Image: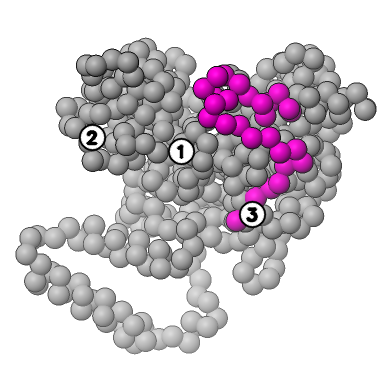
């Protein structure tokens, strides 16, 4: 059960959020809530570098005069507001960013939107695995921001925060009526600065106050250990900057113990970089296509296994749930398509698109744009559908409350059966 409890929430009180992570960080951000995935997930990121804008063929004939006519109502509205709004002066930067946000929202794709500077910085920092904050996993689904668990060795743990603590005030400001996401942003801050949290703890009548000095917190994206019956357990919580090297370290330690089989836990793994998903999949698949990337014009790219895998012959079981998305679905889908692994758990999220983050000039954030859809090796499109496990096993609130993990138990059972057949 320990393995899953540490994966229940993918938002951290670090510099970012931790996709997740943001009000909308599938939006790139990170998963919020213990069971039900929100839209706050890490996108499948192609790259983070600027690209040169191009003009679509149907727009190539447009002239500056055409665009001037098209945008005339916008400038009329701009002038009307500036000349008539009662409270002045107006914040022109906020109006500009609001216009960009509205334009991108009008596309109607929840994965395409404007990332303001704060969200953009949070989104990029989360993939590094380093955060500046108090170091705690949090739940933003309730009335108040709630601590799920402090991170080991973090300022939150040192201060004495406990799972279930509700943050009812921050630096003396009452959080009643403030969204948990807004509260989370207020807790974030540079290392070395102090934040004072007023906590409501179950079973205690009087609130407690904690003055916590923020620090840099490092969270590994891959951990592993040996379970009973000579089973190697690998937990991947995102596909970030350091995931490939961290997986290499974990596999070195586990393979030295000659395991008979491997369980890969992708529950509540919100995704990350496309290239990282290919690198990770290549450890378990010796050859063949890992995914296809399908573009709007009908063309597509294919990504193949790198051919340097070290775990291409051991039996594998993969754990997935409704929080497994994006890059984690690439890995699980490829392993399932090639018959390399049995999937156990519940239907995955269904994040089958690829985004590019394109920075805007003047440090005004970035445009996050869907550029492609991806398909599994058998050309399954999972966007909005998800992956169906080979063995369906639910995990209930009662299971969590009683420290049970029937999904992991079933994974062990299935893996032992696969080992016996080998």
For disc 3, the neighbor class at 10 Å (few under 14, some 14 to 19, many from 20) is few
First in sequence: mark 3 vs mark 1: 1
The number of numbered discs placed on residues in the rendered structure image is 3
Task: Residue at 61%, 61% (x, y): give it.
Answer: 372
Alpha carbon distance from label 1 to label 2:
19 Å
Q: Was residue 160 drawn as part of the magenta stretch in this picture?
A: no
Q: Which residues are magenta?
A: 384-411
Q: Which residue is mark 2?
A: 175
Task: Residue at 27%, 63% (x, y): give it.
Answer: 96
Task: Residue at 53%, 29% (x, y): give it.
Answer: 397
Task: Residue at 24%, 57% (x, y): give it.
Answer: 94
Image coordinates for residue 327, horizontal then vertical, percent: 62, 44
Identify whether 366 is placed above or below 246: below
For disc 1, the neighbor class at 10 Å (few under 14, some 14 to 19, many from 20) is many
First in sequence: mark 2 vs mark 3: 2
- 90 sits to left or right of 329: left
How is the model colour-coded? Answer: one colour
Q: Which residue is mark 3?
A: 385
Snapshot quadrant of residue 64: bottom left
What secondary structure is marked by label 1? loop
What secondary structure is marked by label 2? loop
- 90 sits to left or right of 167: left
Mark 1 vs 2: CB contact within 8 A: no
Q: Was residue 408 drawn as part of the magenta stretch in this picture?
A: yes
Q: Nearer the viewer, residue 226 or 273?
A: 226
Circle number at residue 422: none
Q: Nearer the viewer, residue 408 or 273?
A: 408
Mark 2 vs 3: CB contact within 8 A: no
First in sequence: mark 1 vs mark 2: 1
- Which image quarter is the C terminus in? top right
Q: Which residue is mark 1?
A: 32
Image coordinates for residue 123, horizontal then vertical, percent: 44, 43
């Amino acid at each position: 059960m320990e393995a899953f409890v540490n994966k229940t929430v993918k938002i951290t009180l670090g510099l970012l959020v931790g996709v997740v992570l943001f009000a909308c960080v599938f939006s790139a951000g990170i998963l919020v809530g213990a069971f039900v995935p929100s839209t706050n997930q890490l996108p499948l990121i192609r790259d983070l570098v600027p690209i040169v804008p191009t003009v679509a063929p149907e727009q190539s004939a447009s002239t500056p005069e055409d665009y001037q006519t098209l945008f005339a109502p916008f400038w009329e509205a701009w002038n009307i507001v500036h000349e008539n709004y009662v409270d002045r002066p107006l914040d022109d930067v906020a109006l500009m960013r609001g216009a960009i946000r509205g334009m991108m929202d009008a596309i109607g794709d929840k994965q395409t939107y404007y990332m303001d500077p704060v969200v953009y910085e949070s989104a990029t920092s989360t993939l590094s695995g380093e955060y500046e904050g108090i170091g705690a996993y949090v739940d933003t689904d309730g009335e108040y921001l709630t601590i799920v668990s402090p991170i080991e060795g973090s300022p939150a743990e040192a201060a004495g925060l406990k799972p279930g603590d509700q943050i009812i005030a921050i630096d003396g400001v009452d959080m009643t009526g403030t969204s948990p996401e807004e509260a989370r942003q207020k807790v974030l801050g540079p290392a070395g600065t102090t934040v004072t949290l007023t906590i409501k703890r179950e079973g205690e009548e009087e609130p407690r106050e904690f003055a916590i000095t923020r620090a840099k917190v490092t969270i590994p994206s891959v951990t592993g250990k040996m379970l009973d019956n000579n089973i190697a357990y690998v937990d991947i919580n995102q596909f970030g900057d350091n995931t490939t090297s961290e997986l290499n370290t974990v596999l070195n330690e586990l393979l030295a113990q000659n395991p008979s089989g491997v369980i890969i836990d992708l529950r509540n793994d919100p995704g990350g970089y496309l290239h990282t998903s290919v690198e990770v999949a290549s450890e378990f698949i010796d050859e063949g296509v890992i995914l296809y990337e399908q573009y709007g014009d009908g063309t597509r790219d294919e990504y193949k296994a790198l051919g340097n895998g070290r775990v291409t012959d051991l039996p594998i079981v993969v754990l997935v749930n409704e929080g497994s998305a994006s890059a984690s679905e690439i890995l699980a889908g490829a392993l399932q398509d090639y018959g390399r692994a049995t999937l156990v758990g519940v239907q995955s999220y269904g994040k089958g698109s690829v985004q590019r983050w394109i920075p805007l000039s003047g440090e005004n954030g970035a445009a996050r744009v869907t550029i492609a859809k991806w398909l599994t090796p058998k050309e399954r499109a999972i966007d909005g559908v998800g992956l169906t496990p080979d063995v369906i096993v639910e995990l209930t609130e009662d299971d969590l409350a009683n420290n049970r993990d029937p999904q992991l138990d079933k994974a062990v059972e299935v893996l032992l059966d696969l080992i016996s057949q080998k």
